[in-house]
Image (spheres, rainbow, N blue to C red):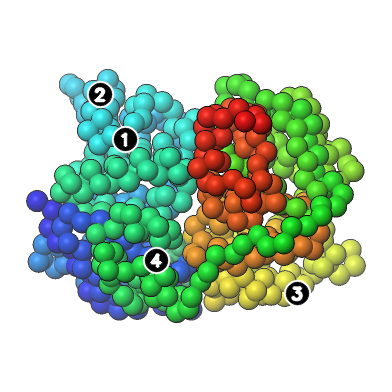
Amino acid sequence: MTPELELRGITKEFPGVRACDGIDLTVKAGEIHCIVGENGAGKTTLMSILYGLLQPDAGHIVIGGRHTSIHSPLEAIDLGIGMVHQAFKLFPTLTVAENVVFRQEPSRRGVIDRRGASRRVRELADAYGLSVDPDAVVEELPVGVLQRVEILKALYRQASVLILDEPTAVLTPQERDRFFEVIRRLRDSGRTILFITHKLAEVMAVADSITVLRQGRSVAELDPAETTPEEISRHMTGRDVSPVRRGRTHTPGKVVLSVETLEVEGFHGLTAVDGVSLEVRAGEVVGIAAVAGNGQSELVEAIAGLRPVVAGTIHIGDQKVTHADVARRRRAGLSYIPEDRHRVGTVAAASISKNLMMGYQRSAQLRRGRWLSLAAVERHARQLCEHYSIKTHSVDAAAASLSGGNLQRIVVAREMSHDSPLLIAEQPTRGVDIGAIQFIHTQILDARDHGRGVLLISAELNEIQALSSRILVMFEGRIVAELDPDTVDEADIGLHMTGGAKVGA
Ligand SMILES: Nc1ncnc2c1ncn2[C@@H]1O[C@H](COP(=O)(O)OP(=O)(O)OP(=O)(O)O)[C@@H](O)[C@H]1O
Ligand SMILES: [Mg+2]
């Protein structure tokens, strides 16, 4: 039986910020308890304390009526608590099964029983509808599957309380529905789920109860049956937040990106992008809608210079950059908000001001004469932190100290702050709170109005629809439809995305 869980008066300070400020939280056994709050509200910190990764400065944890201290994740696991982090922690070159059983490998006569491990992982996966191949190598799997591996890891360690920190941020709408089935099934088997998300529709769909955090305090405990997304967001932000709309249409200007019959390889040399041609003009937002794994990531990586081109051409402005390095593409006019803020977008150990400068060392606004001006870099960083509400006590702090959403703002701020003609925005609002979504959307539309051309890739169909001047749908490496956001609805787009409608149909 899963015991009730209580956090009492949890306080945690970091240099210059009180991340948790006397938080009380009661979680009933066998419920899905959603924790919501703006970026930097203290959600991850609170959960890290429960998982033994951080020690609170004050307050305590009560499990099943007993005061408990949790000094490490190993102790948390012993108490039946499992956590799936915002950033996954898996060994890329090992198989799914090897990752799941790591350090708790089944053995036969003192030897690790690989077949047994694989079989047990498969049984566990089947029991909860988490479809994965135990023998697949982790680095070759899409994020949606990696997450199932993380959940399996916790279940294998007999977690009765499962902490999921923004699990849906990286999922496609289809994967998300399956994920909900999984967590409902886990709840129905008696487990307690702590679920952090920024998406209030998800909260309304799965929560049994809701806690709202704001600036390190618990400001509301809500019953989903008696609240609305508007009320939740008012508790989160203290104001009303309304979605941004695309507004008037513009006459597009000159071509800022031109891709012709592009071919790009993905994993195992398979063709990921299969003869794609597209244009982005100044003053328009071209949205690409696609189910994950249909070549959109490879397309963007090829345009950004992170993946080689097999055939076809890429022009940024009037410069041919098909095989050029990243620096030349930037000089030709490219700014790029990558999907993966940890691996590609930022350097964790470097300071916030360095992260805000990276890739733009040659920019005139950061130089004095021939040299990079540290004063200018710092001033630039301060301005961006202010403008983008990046919560930090110092621009010299390491990027690693930022909350997930604040790190995303760093990437967005850096790439939006240079007036390059072409902006590629890949999942630009992943992990940011609703206030920041509204802000970033406004920035993208402003960029468009100032004559920049934007290529937007997003798994959020409402984001694609709200911002795009026109929508291209990718399916199996090709562009299968061009849609007018004014006349299609999400269901139409979804149909094209799954190959359900032919071109022009
Ligand atoms: N290791 C750390 N060192 C310094 N400050 C930290 C550290 N971890 C978190 N913080 C700060 O504590 C505050 C709360 O961060 P936390 O990661 O808990 O926020 P969050 O609610 O999870 O936000 P998000 O929605 O962006 O993930 C933030 O201001 C953050 O910068
Ligand atoms: Mg967080």
Return the residue at label 2. 119
Q: Is any part of residue 351 visible from this angle? A: no
Amino acid type of the residue tagged 4 in the rendering:
Pro
Return the residue at label 4. 229
Would residue 306 appear left or right of 115 to someone viewing this image? Answer: right
The disc, 4 or 1, on the residue closer to the chain's N-terminal end is: 1
Residue drawn at x 50%, y 65% is 434
Mark closer to the observer (2, 3): 2
Question: Is the residue indicated by label 4 positioned so its CB lies within 8 Å of ligand 1?
Answer: no
Amino acid type of the residue tagged 2 in the rendering:
Arg
Closest to the observer, 382 or 275: 275
Residue drawn at x 55%, y 65% is 243
The disc, 2 or 4, on the residue closer to the chain's N-terminal end is: 2
Mark 2 crowd level (few <14, some 14–19, many ≥20, 10 Å Cα): some
Mark closer to the observer (2, 4): 4
Mark closer to the observer (3, 4): 4
Return the residue at label 1. 130
Give the quarter of the image for residue 148: top left
Q: Secondary structure at mark 3?
A: helix
Q: CA distance from mark 2 to mark 3?
A: 59 Å
Q: CA distance from mark 1 to mark 2?
A: 14 Å
Q: CA distance from mark 2 to mark 4?
A: 43 Å
The disc, 3 or 4, on the residue closer to the chain's N-terminal end is: 4
Amino acid type of the residue tagged 3 in the rendering:
Ala
Mark closer to the observer (3, 1): 1
Q: Measuring from the top left, give residue 284's x and y in whole percent.
A: 75, 53
Q: Secondary structure at mark 2?
A: helix
Return the residue at label 3. 375
